[in-house]
Image (cartoon, grey):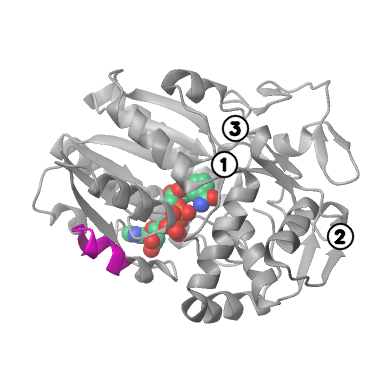
Amino acid sequence: MRILITGGAGFIGSRIALTFADLRGIQVTVLDNLKRRGSEFNLSALRAAGIEFVHGDIRLAGDLDALSHNYDLMIEASAEPSVAAGHTGSPAYVIATNLGGTVHCLEFARKRAARFLFLSTSRVYSIASLREIKLEETPSRFEIAREQTLPGISAEGIREDFPTNKARSFYGTTKLASEMLIQEYVESYGLEALINRCGVIAGPGQFGKADQGVFTMWIACHHFGIPLKYTGFGGTGKQVRDLLHPADLVNLVQKQVAHGRKWEGQIFNVGGGRAISVSMVEMTDACRNITGREVPVEGTGETAPYDIPLYLTDHSNVSEWYDWIPRKSIVNILSECAVWIRAHEQVLKPLFCQTLSSQTPVVT
Ligand SMILES: NC(=O)c1ccc[n+]([C@@H]2O[C@H](COP(=O)([O-])OP(=O)(O)OC[C@H]3O[C@@H](n4cnc5c(N)ncnc54)[C@H](O)[C@@H]3O)[C@@H](O)[C@H]2O)c1
């Protein structure tokens, strides 16, 4: 089997690439424009695993057309993955990559008859609706209240039928528009496709920034002694997210690829779920325990327009289909991040410290 992974030098793409390349009879090609700072560090591991690397850009259809092989499977893992993208500057890059680029990928998959796996996001759900979820407050976090008026929400979290009909950020909207186009390709051309709407993914190998990968960044700040801020919703640090370790996502992707059921554009919410969730206050405690270091954390009330108080994935649908359950706990995820940061301190220090000392992190 031949697999093409766009964005395959990134945090998730490289993890998927290395896992598949390790299996007998599978050849992997990675295409990436190395826009994400840090992705270049993954190239040596990819090459050592026998993975072909192509420096290319999905905004340019010709970069894809120039690939000489046909592929059985294409995994679209490239993106501008920040929910803040286009918020203060032009949205041109996020639209050209996340929407225009996906169309080029779909055309490539159609012409080369490849199956298509798309990494979408929980950010397709409307920000206004996510903020309408009724919450209760405990000393350390927001919790989902028992009574809700919106569809698609239960004590477990957000299901696939949660509203998507209002603004979602440029990031979320380009991903939702891509999902819709994927379904048109399934309907019109019989493209075999699956869509994984992922919540927050965090773990070793993620080059966290103030506006994306905030959980990896949080532990890096503890390690390197950089002060932090709780922003938004009163600055109390009670925002909650569930986290998914990339190994758990890769395990799901393997099951999806191996599964006999036809890919018909099905959409799945994928995430760690309530059992693997954390608030920022709880996160600070965990980082202090794991690193043995404390940094000052002050609170500011200012709420970014795309921030939401809580996101928990109800992954029951995907769990049932694929007999899949995320296994790595919050402590596993953060401990592995700490080990990774310690082992690569020289390389990671300038990367984390330069971006973080000048920006206020926002929970995305
Ligand atoms: N990390 C998360 O928490 C998370 C959550 C939900 C969904 N996702 C989705 O998963 C996918 C992978 O995310 P990630 O966390 O690995 O991000 P990442 O930034 O680490 O990886 C994305 C890769 O795409 C490359 N890229 C960007 N623009 C490109 C272009 N125009 N052409 C070719 N390559 C380009 C980057 O250089 C990078 O290597 C994305 O689609 C993202 O939206 C990620």
Q: Is mark 1 within 8 Å of ligand 1?
A: yes
> Do the residues under discs 3 and 2 have CB atoms within 8 angstroms?
no
Residue 301: image tag: 2
Seen at 39% across and 55% down, the residue is 97
The Cα–Cα distance between marks 3 and 1, rounded to whole angstroms, is 15 Å
Which of the two labelled residues, at mark 3 and mark 2, occupies the earlier sequence position? 3
Instruction: Decide whether residue 161 is among the magenta residues.
Output: no
Q: Position of residue 140 (x, y in %)?
A: 85, 46
Which of the two labelled residues, at mark 3 and mark 1, occupies the earlier sequence position? 3
Please name the residue that numbered disc 3 is placed on: 164
Above or below 305: residue 178: above
Instruction: Indicate the amino acid at tag 1.
Output: Gly
Residue 122: image tag: none
Above or below 31: residue 178: above
Instruction: Indicate the amino acid at tag 2.
Output: Gly
Instruction: Name the one closer to the observer, 327 or 242.
Output: 327
Q: Which residues are magenta?
A: 43-54
Instruction: Decide whether residue 46 is among the magenta residues.
Output: yes
Seen at 74% across and 60% down, the residue is 289
> Do the residues under discs 3 and 1 have CB atoms within 8 angstroms?
no
Instruction: Indicate the amino acid at tag 3.
Output: Thr
Seen at 14% across and 41% down, the residue is 25
Q: Is residue 275 left or right of residue 267?
A: right
Q: Dot 1: what SS?
A: loop
The Cα–Cα distance between marks 3 and 2, rounded to whole angstroms, is 27 Å
Please name the residue that numbered disc 1 is placed on: 199
The Cα–Cα distance between marks 1 and 2, rounded to whole angstroms, is 24 Å
